[in-house]
Image (cartoon, rainbow, N blue to C red):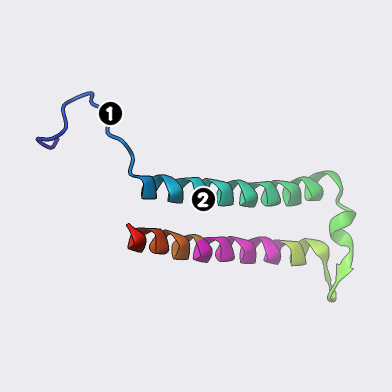
Amino acid sequence: MTKDKKPGEIVAVPEADMKTFKRGLVLFVVYITAYALFTIAGTVRKEILMIRVFGMNLGIVGGMIIIAGAIIIAVYYNWYAGKVEAEA
């Protein structure tokens, strides 16, 4: 423990950390929702994922989109957190 903090004392979270946390939480919920819908569609309505798109079935294309979306979200969050940190 540091000298400035007493045991049991609550320390306020800096505003910049709270901004990045909230943005990350929103992005996480967006990703989880998309992934859950994709998984539920594959479980309940298998015929939807059998539709042909670009010569492949929608399950393959959708899976690639989910993966690409996760990468895009991660890159965006990294950029956003860096920008917020630089401003602080």
Q: Secondary structure at mark 2?
A: helix
**Going by the image, does 34 lie left or right of 17?**
right
Q: Which residue is mark 1?
A: 10
Tell me the amino acid under the disc marked 1.
Answer: Ile
Q: Which mark is residue 23?
A: 2
Q: Considering only vertical position in the picture, is 34 above or below 86?
A: above
Tell me the amino acid under the disc marked 2.
Answer: Arg
Give the residue displayed 46% in from the left and 61% down from the top.
80
Q: Which region shows up in magenta?
A: 63-76
Quarter of the C terminus within the rendering: bottom left
Instruction: Give how far apart the Cα atoms at labels 2 and 1 are.
Output: 23 Å
Quarter of the N terminus within the rendering: top left
Q: Position of residue 67 (x, y in %)?
A: 63, 63
| Foreground residue among 30 and 56 | 30
| Foreground residue among 4 and 36 | 4
Give the residue displayed 42% in from the left and 59% down from the top.
81
First-in-chain label (2 vs 1): 1
**Going by the image, does 48 lie left or right of 6?**
right
> Which residue reaches farthest bottom?
55
Give the residue displayed 58% in from the left and 66% down from the top.
72
Q: Position of residue 83 (x, y in %)?
A: 41, 64
Find out whether residue 69 is within the magenta segment. yes
Q: Position of residue 15 (x, y in %)?
A: 37, 45
**Going by the image, does 84 lie left or right of 70?**
left
Disc 1 crowd, CA 10 A, few/some/many (<14, 14-19, 20+) = few
Give the residue displayed 44% in from the left and 51% down from the top.
20
Disc 2 crowd, CA 10 A, few/some/many (<14, 14-19, 20+) = some
Q: Considering only vertical position in the picture, is 55 above or below 23?
A: below
Q: Secondary structure at mark 1?
A: loop
Find out whether residue 3 is within the magenta segment. no
Q: Position of residue 52 (x, y in %)?
A: 88, 68
> Which residue reaches farthest front?
87
